[in-house]
Amino acid sequence: MSKIIVLTPIKNEDWILEQFLTVTSLFADCIVVADQLSTDRSREICAAFPKVHLIINDKENYGEDERQILLIETARKLFPDDKRILMGLDADEIFAADSLQQQATWDRIRSLPPGTSLHFERTDMIFNNNKCIRGDQYHQYFPLGYVDDGHAHEPDIIHSRRVPCNPAGDTVYIEEIKILHFLYSRMKVRYAKIRFYSVIENVNRSSSTYVRRYKYNADEMKKIRNSSRVKPVPVKWLREWEEMGINLKNFYEPEFSWQDFEVLEHFRNYGYKRFHTDDIWYFDWEACREEAAKHGKEIPPAPIERPGTFIQHSLKLIDNLYLLSRRLRLKPLRA
């Protein structure tokens, strides 16, 4: 029988970790959790679940490449002689309640040949779980599973594929099993994440200014509200979890998150003016700096100033020009 091994990186995820591990323990044979310097109750929560194998990621800098390799190599060492199905899930990604009833689908997954990539629909839950974002065809499907054949993983530093990919292997879309993504359950933290990603890409020089400003735009929720992809959430996705008393609605949200404090470290290391071109200045960084100082965190020594009016107007022009160029590139050719 194939072993289903879930690979999960965490850092300060106690807001949802217990819910995630409760659900995931119902179908996984093992949950390999890599904790990166959490300061909350995350490790304590992991210790309460027998299927969790906790490892320590002691890297101070953010990097999805090293952490995913760490998770995959650990799974392979734990089960060297077993057929392994690797599942890359974040702590805020929870299987829909009706997924456990899809026994025929799970049996099919276990029978697939090594090297097969498994794509699952990951739908973003919004508006207190009453609505969700769903794509047409396979728009919201992601390669979150892999029938392991030992193939080397080649990850990226940020927004990396979580499991290996063998170009010679098959790709299978699993339509009966859904993954619920609680990305928008804490909007302050959501915006903290997109600011953090923008800063990380700036530091790594992995994208240009105008691409970063488009990818990590502060008007994200305005786009979602007007999207035709917003659909009602099927009752069967949540009913059993609600009956079990699993809370998937009321989450604690801090005023400042660990992502905000790490951005301050980059301000201190590189100077905050380097990031004046990023779309992160709708946030009060000076208030964040003052809060970080109360907790003894490393912060920029001087007050943080927003970009000037000329820079702000210039960046808005860049945004508009980039949006226009995208529309022109994507515009269907007329006969």
Image (tube, rainbow, N blue to C red):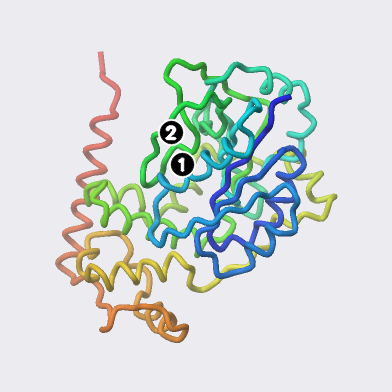
Camera-side residue: 29 or 258?
A: 29
* Residue in the picture at 57% in, 53% down: 55
Q: Work out which quarter of the rendered image holds the C terminus and state it.
A: top left
Q: Which residue is mark 2?
A: 153
The circle on residue 69 is: 1
Q: Is residue 199 left or right of residue 233?
A: left
Task: Provide residue 11's location: percent of width, then percent of height.
Answer: 53, 60
Q: Is residue 66 above or below residue 61?
A: above
Decide: few, some or many residues near mark 1? Use Cα within 10 Å; few <14, some 14-19, many ≥20: some
Q: Earlier in the sequence, mark 2 or mark 1?
A: 1
Camera-side residue: 92 or 213?
A: 92
* Residue in the picture at 66% in, 22% down: 109
Amino acid found under the numbered disc labelled 1: Ile
* Residue in the picture at 70% in, 19% down: 108
Decide: few, some or many residues near mark 2? Use Cα within 10 Å; few <14, some 14-19, many ≥20: some
Amino acid found under the numbered disc labelled 2: His
Q: Work out which quarter of the rendered image holds the N terminus and state it.
A: top right
Whether pointer 2 and pointer 1 mark residues with C-beta atoms closer than 8 Å, the reply is yes
Task: Provide residue 9's location: percent of width, then percent of height.
Answer: 54, 51
Task: Provide residue 135's location: percent of width, then percent of height.
Answer: 52, 32
For this orientation, the residue located farthest to the top is: 335
Secondary structure of the residue carrying tag 1 is helix
Residue 137 can be seen in this image: no
Task: Provide residue 191's location: percent of width, then percent of height.
Answer: 44, 60
The circle on residue 194 is: none
* Residue in the picture at 65% in, 56% down: 17
Q: Is residue 6 above or below residue 189?
A: above
Q: Rounded to the nearest whole Å, what is the CA distance between mark 2 and mark 1?
A: 7 Å
Residue 170 can be seen in this image: yes
Q: Which picture quadrant has residue 194?
A: bottom left
Q: Is residue 165 left or right of residue 50?
A: left
